[in-house]
Every structure is written in C-alpha cells, then in structure tokens.
Image (spheres, grey):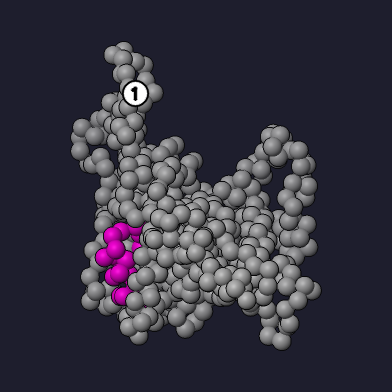
Amino acid sequence: MSGLCTRCLDGCEGGCEIFLASFRGREVLYPGPFGEVTAGANKNYPVDYSHLNIQGYAVGAKGLPEGVEANPDTAIFSNVDTTTEYGWEKKVKMKVPIFTGALGSTEIARKNWEHFAIGAAISGITLVCGENVCGVDPELELTSDGKVKKSPEMDRRITTYKRFYEGWGEILVQMNVEDTRLGVAEYVIEKHGLDTIELKWGQGAKCIGGEIKLKSLERALELKKRGYVVLPDPTLKEVQEAFKKGALREFERHSRLGFVEKESFLKEIERLRSLGFKRITLKTGAYSAVELAMALRFGAEAKLDLITIDGAPGGTGMSPWPMMNEWGIPTFYLEALAYQFAEKLTKRGFRVPDLAIAGGFSTEDGVFKAIAMGAPYVKAVCMGRALMIPGMVGKNIEKWLKEGNLPKTVSKYGTTPEEIFITYEELKEKYGDEMKNIPLGAVGIYTFVQKFKTGLQQLMAGSRNFRISTISRKDLIALTEDAAKISGIPYVMDAYREEAERILEE
C-alpha cells in the first residue's frame, strides 16, 4: 500500500516518488511534461463496467423506422441509427452519443484546438470549450470594471468550430468562478451568439479548481494580477530569486473552489437565461451522494438541458496524482446512484434533465453499457482523452509526413494521407478544396468516430436495438453479485430466468 521499496538503501540514486519529491517538492504532484501529456489514474476499483456484459437476442428488432417490418433483410447492423439528442425543449442532435471533455486553458488543449474543434464539427458531435480560456489569454483586454472586452483566444476557439459546423452537435463554453467574475457568458453571447453555456461544479479527476503551469515569472505575475491563485506566490522576493537561479522552473495557476447553494444557483440560471442563452448545462464531479442529489434536484427545478456527471478517476491535462487515484466516487458507482436518484425524482413527479456520464470511457462497448445502465435518462457519454488522442495522432502523422520521418507503425499503411487514413477519400469527396483547411488531426478524430459508430451499430444490432432510445437496462447482465447489488442490473444467472423456465415447462 505504501508504494515504497521493502528495502530502502541509504545512498540509493533514485527512482521512487519520495526520492524525487525530496528535492523537486510540489512538482511531483502533477503529471508531466505539462502541455505534452494527458494523464489518467491506474487504480483498479472493486467493481467497474467490465463487470457488466451486453445481452444478445435471437428474436425481435426494436426501433426500426415506422412501417418497416423486422426481418433478416431489414434488421441489418448498418441500418442502426446511432443519433442521439439532449435538451429540455430546444434539442441538440449528435450523430453518435459521445462528445468531448472540457478542453480549457491547458496547453495541450490550446495547441491542438484546431484539430479537436474541426474534428468534432465534421464528426457531428458537441465540443466543450472548458474553463479559464479568457482568463489566461495573453491578449485579453478588460473593461474598466474588469470584464472581458476582447479575447482573441476565445474568438479563435469558437470560430474554428463554427467554420465547419453542419448542424450536428454544438460548441458550448464552460464557466467557473473566475469566468463568471470576468463576464465570459456576456462576452460569448454578445460577440458570438452562442446558444449554450455550461456551469461547472467539478470533474472526476480532481476536487479542486482547474489548474495549469506557467513557465515565466512575467506570466505568473500577470495571472495573479487578474485574480487567479498562483503558487508559489510570484510577488515574493525569495520566490523570484529561486526562479532566477533556476531552482524554481514553473508556477501553478489554480482556480477557486465553488460553493453551491440552491437559491443562488437558481438565480444564476435565471440570469443566464435573461442574457439570451437557449440552453444551460451543468458539469459536476465525483463528489458525495449529497452533491449528486443536489445536481439532479436543482437541475430538475432549473430545467437544465444536460447534466454531465463525471466519475473518478477521470483524465486530465493537469490534476494532482493523489486526487486522480484516491478521491471521489468511481464512475460505475456514481452512475448507479444517479439512476436511483433519477428514479426517485421521477416517481415524485419531477422531470429529470437529460444526463451524460463521464470518467474513463474510451470504446463503444463502454458507452453502450453507460447508456443502458442509466436508461432512459442517460443520452450520451462525455469522452476526454479518448477523443483527444486521435487528434494528436493525426497531428503527429501530419508532422512526420512533412519531415519524411513516418514511424513503421504508420508507414506500413502508406506514405500519403490518402493511403494512411481510411476515411480520407470520403472526406475529400465531401469537402473538395476545403480539405486543405482540414488538418490531419481532425481527420484522425473523424476516422475514430466512424470506427466507434460501426462498433456501436454492431453491438446495438446484436441486442436488437436499432435506435439509441430503445436501449434499456434489460440489455445488460451483471457478471458478479457485487456488480448486480450496486447497479441493480440482474445477475447473469437470474436475468430472464423466469421467461426461460416458462419455455422449459411448456
């Protein structure tokens, strides 16, 4: 449990975390190198989604188009409709039931934004622009009362997505405490006419505010002046001296913790609607059952359009390792609670907002399980790292091609984009000359989404669901009694047992 060697030799030259922390201190808390790595915890929880399996059937076909009779010629997996929608009244439709995690002020989000944004747009999924984007913009201009007057970085992020937007999904901007104080909501609706704004209570990877690293003293002083928490304090003489001598090489910028209170929350929702937003969503993290109940109950009263529930361990561009590994309710358990609470509210006459689940998903089978386990409330899954990786892979292939330095893992498929990317010709046919403005990172995301869609179609057809809305909890079985107890999904030896026994007794 300690993670220490059983024999610690005086004179050891290093390797363990405590060795490094002995002279690098707080640096060791965070994944690195910052701006080049996305990280996730590696903790095995007692129960997770691998402890569920998907039911398959040899009869039936739910969700075929009206008037279409179910038979071997119509119930073909390629006919499965993978589209989904969310929203209280004004719905947003997506081509597949996944959308990006909040890509905010981290360096990895900034430098890869073009790939992520265009990839999401051409794939027909929602893109979440995360917190603090305006607040850390080097070219930010503020009004005399400290509100955003101009943010070229936010402008770039929104216009990049909108250029290739085709009516599927949307771009929404997330706000935390600092964003609210800076007037980010007012800026994005007045300048860009965004339909949706998202309030952030938390995330699965950590239970503190968002954070990034800063490489210069000048930048640290600038962000501290803007009202952020910057550590170590760049205004202190000893800190500045340590930085000049090279011992201190970077600073941390942290966001403040929010405090949720029902009356002020509902008042903020009302204020945002008065600004003109058509949809308001909420992102909450792996907090206790109390905060989950608050999110669902307050959200129902506020008529939120979507609540994204992010479980532990989550993924990150920068979150402390101890938090990723050891804090919060894991996604499987959190979704089980969310379903129970949603059912209770429904029985009491409340309409529960549409839900999305996040926290460790990367494949279509996991998404199917999350939607089924949370049916009929869960409409989609929020994917962080799994949708970022294809963007970075495609970007690097583009770089390697220019350098003439393709690794063998790629070059075995070809030496041109047309040969390497299985969807390239499809996109070229659709976009023509515009292909020169679509980076290969975006092509990577589109290609991944097409694989995801096909795999999901196969799983759905096997469970005889030809629309997302027909997927139900009956389409899952629990492989262990613990998983059954936590989720309420029937144990494999009990599922459909009564129906099977009736056939045997006929």
Query: Quick check: 322 left or right of 55?
Result: left
Q: Quadrant of residue 456?
A: bottom right
Q: Secondary structure at mark 1?
A: loop
Q: Quadrant of the N terminus?
A: top left
Asked whether the viewer can see residue 195, the reply is no
> Which amino acid type is marked by label 1?
Cys
Q: Main secondary structure of the magenta part?
A: helix
Camera-side residue of 474 and 321 = 474
Residue 246 rendering spot, x and y as whole percentages: 33, 27
Residue ranking furthest to the front? 505
Residue ranking furthest to the top? 11
For the magenta stretch, what is the residue range? 284-300
Determine the residue positioned at 72% across, 78% down. Answer: 70
Q: Is residue 171 magenta?
A: no
Above/below status of 126 relative to 366? below
Q: Quadrant of residue 445?
A: bottom right
Determine the residue positioned at 71% across, 87% down. Answer: 67
Q: Quadrant of residue 298?
A: bottom left
Query: Quick check: 78 left or right of 345?
Result: right
Above/below status of 61 relative to 131? below
How many marks on residues? 1
Residue 278 rendering spot, x and y as whole percentages: 44, 80
Residue 502 rendering spot, x and y as whole percentages: 58, 74
Determine the residue positioned at 74% across, 69% down. Answer: 76
Camera-side residue of 502 and 91 = 502
Query: Quick check: 406 left or right of 84?
Result: right
Residue 31 rendering spot, x and y as whole percentages: 40, 39
Determine the residue positioned at 38% across, 60% down. Answer: 486
Q: Quadrant of the C terminus?
A: bottom right
Q: Is residue 297 magenta?
A: yes
Residue picked out by circle 1: 5
